[in-house]
Amino acid sequence: MQIRSGGTSVPAALDALDTNIVDILRLNGRATNQEIAEKLSVTAATVSSRLQKMEEARVMRVVAVTDFSAYNYDLIIALGVRVLGREVTEVASELAALDQVLSVNIMSGEYDMELLVALHDIAEVQSLLYEHIASIEGVLEIDPGIAVDIVKFEFNVAPL
């Protein structure tokens, strides 16, 4: 199974200091190297060096993550999509270009793809499903599931 395109390099092992740095950044992505250093009783240069090594090893990267509600998205929908008569990757690329689509995952199983979509309100569902997604060549079936509550959402791809 391929998780990410690219080389097959083994990720660098993280020690306790690396893990603590990442944990601090997960709680406060705006923490400065100096603030992190003070919390961990090391120098800011050490923090900077560790961050650079982790990014170069592709173990982590620092990104901004927005909250759905901050952009007035009040509806999250998971969509199962079946494709017929066209390459799944081509359909996936077109779906990924839609502004409302947060993620597109090519799957093995019942659906060829699963999408995560954010909408402002229920009135947008019909337009998204019929005018945008169903109109893409190759989309055979769409199976929507509306999130009624979000119990847990973490952007962290892999817990340390």
Image: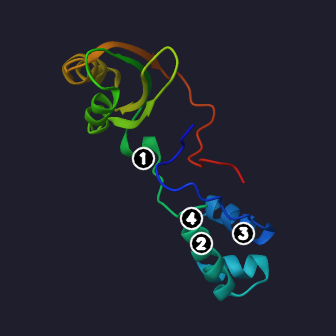
Q: Are marks 2 and 3 in contact (CB under 8 Å)?
A: no
Of the two numbered discs 2 and 3 on the same chain, state the one appearing first in sequence.
3
Sequence-first tag of 3 and 1: 3
Q: What is the distance, in whole Å, between disc 2 and disc 3 at their CAs?
A: 15 Å
Distance Cα–Cα, label 3 vs label 1: 30 Å
The crowd level at tag 1 (other Cα within 10 Å; few <14, some 14-19, many 20+) is few
Closest to the observer: 108 or 61? 108
Q: Which residue is mark 2?
A: 31
Disc 3 crowd rating (10 Å Cα; few below 14, some 14-19, many 20+) is some
Give left or right: position of 9 versus 12.
left
Residue type highlighted by circle 2? Ala
**Residue under label 1:** 70
Q: Of the residues under marks 1 and 2, which one precedes in the sequence? A: 2
How far apart in space, not on screen, are marks 3 and 4 (Cα)?
15 Å
x, y (%) of residue 136?
Answer: 21, 23
Q: Quadrant of residue 82?
A: top left
Q: Are marks 3 and 1 in contact (CB under 8 Å)?
A: no
Q: CA distance from mark 1 to mark 2?
A: 21 Å
Q: Nearer the viewer, mark 4 or mark 1?
A: 4
Quarter of the image that includes the N terminus: top right
Do callouts 3 and 4 mark residues in contact (Cβ within 8 Å)?
no
Badge 4 vs badge 2, beta-carbon distance below 8 Å: yes
Q: Mark 1 or mark 2, which is nearer to you?
A: 2
Q: Quadrant of residue 137?
A: top left
Q: Which residue position is annotated with label 3?
A: 18
Kind of residue indicated by mark 3? Asp
Instruction: Please give the residue where the numbered disc 4 appears in the rendered image.
Output: 29
Secondary structure beneath label 4: loop
